[in-house]
Structures are given as C-alpha cells and as structure tokens.
Image (cartoon, rainbow, N blue to C red):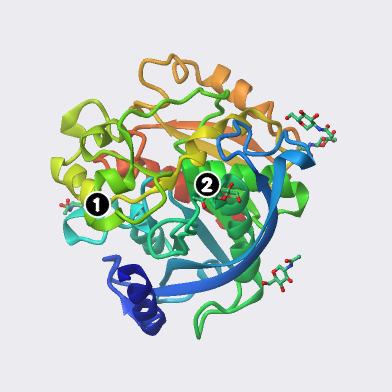
Amino acid sequence: MFSSLSRILLLLVTQSLATHIYGQDCSCSSVVVSTHVDTLIAKDPSDPFGGLQSNATDLRRLNETYDTFGVFCAPTQKTAQSTDVVQLLVHGFSYTNEYWSPATEEFQNQSYAAYACERGLSTFAIDVLGTGQSTRPANASDVQYASTSAVISQLARHLKSTSIIPGVESFKQVIGVGHSAGSASLIYGAIVEAENSPLDALVLTGEVTLQPGGLSIPGIVSGRDDTPLRWSSLDPNYVTVTSTDRTLFYPADTSLFSPRMVTYDGFTKDLGPTSLLAALGFSSLSVNYTGPVAKVVGLQDQLICVGTGRCDDIEALNAAERVLWPKAKSFEVILTEGGHCMNLDFLAEGAFSVVVGLVKQFAGLN
Ligand SMILES: *[C@@H]1O[C@H](CO)[C@@H](O)[C@H](O)[C@H]1NC(C)=O
Ligand SMILES: *[C@@H]1O[C@H](CO)[C@@H](O)[C@H](O)[C@H]1NC(C)=O
Ligand SMILES: *[C@@H]1O[C@H](CO)[C@@H](O)[C@H](O)[C@H]1NC(C)=O
Ligand SMILES: *[C@@H]1O[C@H](CO)[C@@H](O)[C@H](O)[C@H]1NC(C)=O
Ligand SMILES: *[C@@H]1O[C@H](CO)[C@@H](O)[C@H](O)[C@H]1NC(C)=O
C-alpha cells in the first residue's frame, strides 16, 4: 500500500528539484523510467552461476515491464563533459540509490554524486530492480543478475537515445559505476552483451572475482522477520543484513567512520533477493566485454581484503583479475583506502577521487 502510493507521488514529483545532494552548483531530479526486459533466467535462483552455465531446460523466460526509480544530478553550469557523459550508478546489496548520496546534511561528505557533480560530471543513481522505489516483483526469484543486468542495459540504451528530463539531451556515453552486488550486475551484463554492451566503460568498486560459495556475509535475515513494520508482506527470499552486523561493511578501525553513519545505514537499509548472494560464482567466468574496465577495492574492506591476503600483492591481484577480461580495452585493479562501503567512511574522498579520475580518463576528458 505504502509503496504503491509513494510511487504515484514520486511520479508526480518527477522533474521537480530534489534535495538529495548539497553541492551548490548541482541540481538533482527524481526520475522513473519504465523498461521492458525479455530474458532467460535460472529456474533455480540459487544456481551458483546465475544461469550462465545452464542449458535451456534449467532456464525460464522472464518477459516483464519494470519501473526504475533514480536520481539524476548534473552541474547547473553545463559543459561538454556534463552533457555528453553520464555515470549510471548501481548500488550494492541491501542499499538503494542513497548509497551514492545519503540524504542528510551531516553526511554531505559521503556523497559521491555531489563530489562528481562539483567536478563537472553527471550521475544517474538508480534503485536496482527489487529495491527502494523501483518495482519489487512479488516473487523474489524473478530478481536475479540476469534480470537486474537486463534492466541496467535497457536504462543505458534509454539514456543514449532519449531525454530523461526536459532540458537534458540524450548522452553520447554511459559509464557504469557499480558497488559490490551492483558491480556484479554490471559484470553479468558485460558477459551477456560483450561487445554489444551499451555501457562505454565500467568502474567496479567493492568487488573481486569469487568462486561459488566464496563469500559469506553474517546476519542475513528475511526482511519480513527483520523489520515487519516495513516488509511483513514480502516473499521471505527478499533478505537484508541485520543492523548490528552492518559494521562489517565499514573498516574494523571504528575511528574511521561515524557511528551515526552506521545507525543511519540501519534505518535506511533495503532488501535484495537471496539469488544475488548465491550466484556470485559467475564472477569467476571470462568476460568478452571490449570497453575499458577498472576495479577499485578498499584496503580496509573486511569482506574482500582484511584477513584474506588477497590485497597484499597488487601485482598478483591484478594478474588474477585481468585474465578474465581478455578483450577489454584496458583493465586494472586499484587499491584505495576505505572499507567495503567505501563511500560511507571518513576515507571516502580518496575513493571518490580515484573513481572520478577513472571516469574522466575512460570518457576521454582531460
Ligand atoms: C541440462 O542440464 C541438466 C543438469 O543441469 C542435465 O540433467 C540435463 O541432462 C541437461 N540437458 C541437456 C539437454 O543437455
Ligand atoms: C512479452 O511482453 C510483451 C509486452 O508486455 C508482450 O507484448 C508480448 O506478447 C510478450 N511475449 C510473450 C511471448 O509473452
Ligand atoms: C566535509 O569535508 C570538509 C573538507 O574536508 C570539511 O571541512 C567539513 O567539515 C566536512 N563536513 C562534514 C559535515 O563532515
Ligand atoms: C516464484 O516463481 C517460481 C518460478 O516461476 C515458482 O516456481 C515459485 O513457485 C514462485 N514462488 C511463489 C511464492 O509464487
Ligand atoms: C568469448 O569469446 C570467445 C572467442 O573469442 C568464445 O570462445 C567464448 O565462448 C566467448 N565467451 C562468452 C561468454 O560468450
């Protein structure tokens, strides 16, 4: 009830000025884009390769139209770089578009959208299928990497062909910037679409190649058990991470983040389907994508780096990751300071600077 009502209201406020970011010279608008996906997905949503290794008998057709909510931000002062290039920002598991710009003034320094905008770059931060104010299919098994990535590709094509709000022309380049499971969605799309991908470059934060079962996150719980007030009527396969376990997304050193950020994170967290955790084994498959690619990983990332030895030797990490992208125009892994949710700790500006640098380099800007 609440969500359908809020969706109607949001459609009405579409194109009005939002206050999601605090940069003085940026304006942001809430946008809802409808996309049609027609794709094959795994019958078993716990398939470790997300259907990519399956034969036809293990797949089913998903032919649906979904709404995607997003926040578009652009510098008020238009330049070629802000009107030609847009970053499509794809959040990770149990977050929403707010990962890229927490909607409270205290955390203005955690806003990647504001940081990028102040440096002349436009962003479109979406709520991934099944989260936030985007369509949440009743059956969680409809939300898999095959469907999230299909929506993302359709959005990228939309951004390149159509004006999303009055006064903003279609873009020449769309660069995918992901975090964690959002990076995984971009990789899934890069496997499926390869040289036909509508994304001109990929910046993948908070993600490394995993073998099936290679990641375990504590505190996974059905949304309806965790927060009945919000989610009691939902499919139990929509899950979240308990508010107490979310500190794992931050550095182990508690002086590196605000305890109020973790509290805020707990209040604003969202859901994802179990499939997004179960299917990460596909990230060990080879990708024929042809654009430039970079992965950005935080050294204080307790899911990826700390205690794993993985981030001790950057040459070895680069070699292990690069081999899966044989046709990429360029590929590198960059280690930065920061935890798993590198936007949300006090080290965020270091990660922001690396990501903006990569986006400008890939877009061919200065
Ligand atoms: C499809 O894969 C399943 C196991 O995943 C197997 O049992 C079945 O024989 C395969 N079918 C074909 C036509 O290859
Ligand atoms: C797929 O969905 C479209 C749009 O809803 C519809 O027109 C079409 O008939 C569907 N195709 C099949 C095979 O169901
Ligand atoms: C944000 O960062 C700037 C520059 O580092 C600093 O001066 C300011 O106090 C910070 N603001 C908040 C709310 O933390
Ligand atoms: C969800 O969809 C799958 C595949 O169509 C089906 O097997 C399953 O029973 C559905 N679950 C619910 C709760 O409707
Ligand atoms: C990638 O391209 C190679 C040929 O260059 C092909 O053998 C392989 O099947 C392709 N991979 C995928 C996932 O399509």
Q: Is residue 113 above or below residue 92?
A: below
Measured as percent of width and height from the top left, residue 338 is found at: 33, 34
Specify the quadrant of the image occupied by residue 206: top left
Residue at 41% x, 71% y is 75
Local SS, label 2:
helix
Q: Amino acid at mark 1?
A: Pro
Residue at 22% x, 46% y is 266
Q: Is residue 308 above or below residue 199?
A: above
Question: In the drawing, what numbered circle is on residue 358?
Answer: 2
Residue at 39% x, 65% y is 133
Given contact means CB atoms under 8 Å apart, are the residues at marks 2 and 1 in contact?
Answer: no
Of labels 2 and 1, earlier in sequence is 1
Measured as percent of width and height from the top left, residue 350 is found at: 35, 41
Specify the quadrant of the image occupied by residue 196: bottom right
Residue at 66% x, 74% y is 161
On whether ligand 4 comes within 8 Å of the CB at mark 1, the answer is no
* Residue count near mark 2 (Cα–Cα under 10 Å), binned few <14, some 14–19, many ≥20: many
Ligand 5, what quadrant? top right
Question: In the drawing, what numbered circle is on residue 228?
Answer: 1
Say which of marks 2 and 1 sits in front.
1
Question: In the drawing, what numbered circle is on residue 132?
Answer: none
